[in-house]
Amino acid sequence: MKSILFITIFTFVSSALFAQEVGFMGLNIGMSREEVLNFADDNDLIKVPKNRDVEFFPVEDRKILSFSVLPEIPDMYLQFYDDKLYAITVIFNEKYIDYYALIGVLENKYGPYAELVPEWRKWQIEEIEIRVEKPAVVKYIALDEFIEAAGFESQSTTSGKERKEMILEGL
């Protein structure tokens, strides 16, 4: 009995110790809105505007905050659902930080990318997807967890080839 308890505690503690915080400048996926605002207020680089709430969505539990780190980052959007941070979009000013610099840093931190298309590269860190998009945008998102929490319908199970054929048949 003691060994089972020890193994259970060890597994829980070790997974908590090795779980990687993923996010930007200390703003990590999973933080509460209050934690994010307190962190941003205490950070000298992050500019928190008076009108920091962006009202794109008429849904009560879905909120977006807007920050900046001028001049390098004119826009940073943090999307919450039910007071939990699920997505961060960081738009860089290419004059200061470009697409290839972003890729280099992420490759050093997380290793080789998992997926590549001409417009972006993607890393998968546990349940969080990180995409570097052209011209110079980084997106962090816990997509599966966000979709489940928000109750969105899951994507179609129709394969890409079948979808393409259906679309072309519709011409």
Image: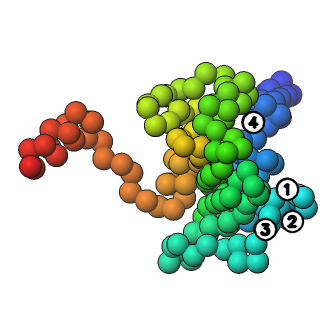
Bin the neighbour count of mark 3 within 10 Å (Cα to Cα): few under 14, some 14-19, many 20 and up. Answer: some
Disc 3, SS: loop
Q: Residue furthest top?
A: 112
Q: Position of residue 69 (x, y in %)?
A: 77, 56
What separation in Å lies between label 4 and label 1 (alpha carbons)?
23 Å
What separation in Å lies between label 2 and label 4 (alpha carbons)?
24 Å
Labels 4, 3: front one:
3
Q: Residue at x 83, y 34 (%)?
A: 17
Bin the neighbour count of mark 1 within 10 Å (Cα to Cα): few under 14, some 14-19, many 20 and up. Answer: few
Q: Answer left or right for 68 relative to 168.
A: right
Labels 2, 4: front one:
2
Q: At label 1, which amino acid type do we have?
A: Leu
Q: At label 2, which amino acid type do we have?
A: Asp
One can see residue 8 in this view = no
Q: Report which residue position mark 2 lands on.
A: 41
For residue 146, above or below residue 49: above
Callout 1 touching callout 2 (CB < 8 Å):
no
Among numbered discs 4 and 1, the one appearing first in the sequence: 4
Among numbered discs 2 and 3, the one appearing first in the sequence: 2
Q: Report which residue position mark 1 lands on.
A: 45
Q: Report which residue position mark 4 lands on.
A: 20
Q: Report which residue position mark 3 lands on.
A: 48
Q: At label 3, which amino acid type do we have?
A: Val
Front-most of 70 and 51?
70
What separation in Å lies between label 2 and label 3 (alpha carbons)?
7 Å
Q: Position of residue 48 (x, y in %)?
A: 78, 68
Q: Position of residue 45 (x, y in %)?
A: 85, 56
